[in-house]
Amino acid sequence: MAYKKEELNVNDTRCIAYYCENPKYILIQPVDEHDIKVLDREVELISNDVGENFLFIAFKISDWNNDLSPWNAPAVFGKYGFGDGAKNTLSFIEDVLIDFICEKYQIKNKIPIILGGYSLAGLFSLWSSYQSTSFNAIVGVSPSVWFNGWEEFIDKNSPFSKVIYLSLGDKEEKTKNQTMARVGKAIQKQEEVLNNRGIKTILEWNNGGHFQDSDIRLAKGFVWCIKNI
């Protein structure tokens, strides 16, 4: 299936849509400039592996450490800490973006929505599953589950999404940064907690570190979710 691509401005947010007729799924991904450069390949990989049409919509995050962070947290690299802008980003998706694309692309029936992201956008996607009933499945690829307070949060809360994909590079925990080195154990705990909550989940290990193959890894996650909803 050949997907058409177009740039959109939605409430002053840059969005990129890949669309075709009669989509059966909506895929949503918060992105940065690197993600945007490899979106064509990511969508091609998803299309090659699934037999049904989908609508893929990416939207540009302007302040990564603030707009995707669920609560304030100290810096773990560099000098910039984390804000608490995730609630506003989730509100944009739920109150603006979904309605906009359903109207623009004439999606009249309720179809499954999958939210996914990489790194801090992966953590945002996981966090959103605990806040909202809008998402049928979640893709958390190399999610920042080392985030301050995250393990306590998942112990006390349950996600609404019933299908959640997790993956991590096998070298990501091999870092001198003590906070980020927790990521391996933290994502294994995330998988365990989701299993205990009765969520259909998988933890897939990829070769390499954090900054490689994000398009391939994300595509694998979206494909898995489509096949397991």
Image (tube, rainbow, N blue to C red):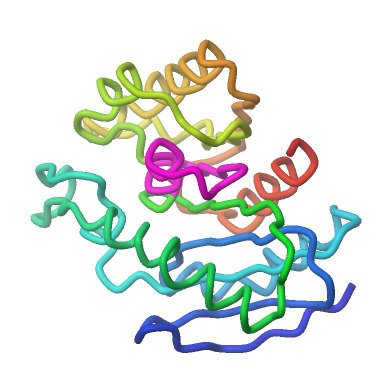
Q: Is residue 138 magenta?
A: yes
Using residue 1 as the reference point, say whether residue 155 is left or right of it.
left
Rendered residue at 63%/88% (across/down): 6
Is the residue 211 above or below the residue 200 in the image?
Answer: below
Residue situated in front as seen by the camera: 46 or 55: 55
| x then y, percent, for residue 200 | 65, 25
Rendered residue at 41%/74% (across/down): 60
| x then y, percent, for residue 183 | 37, 29
Using residue 80 as the reference point, say whether residue 43 is left or right of it.
right
Which stretch appears magenta? 122-143
Picture mark count: 0
| x then y, percent, for residue 8 | 52, 88
Residue situated in front as seen by the camera: 28 or 43: 28
Residue situated in front as seen by the camera: 42 or 114: 114
Residue situated in front as seen by the camera: 209 or 198: 198
Rendered residue at 51%/20% (across/down): 194
Image quadrant occupied by the C terminus? top right
Rendered residue at 69%/80% (across/down): 105
The part of the image, by quadrant, that contains residue 23 is bottom right
The part of the image, by quadrant, that contains residue 163 is top right
Is the residue 140 above or below the residue 65 in the image?
Answer: above
Image quadrant occupied by the N terminus? bottom right
| x then y, percent, for residue 221 | 65, 45
Is the residue 138 above or below the residue 162 in the image?
Answer: below
Is the residue 29 above or below the residue 205 in the image?
Answer: below
In this view, the residue farthest toward the front is 108
In this view, the residue farthest toward the top is 196
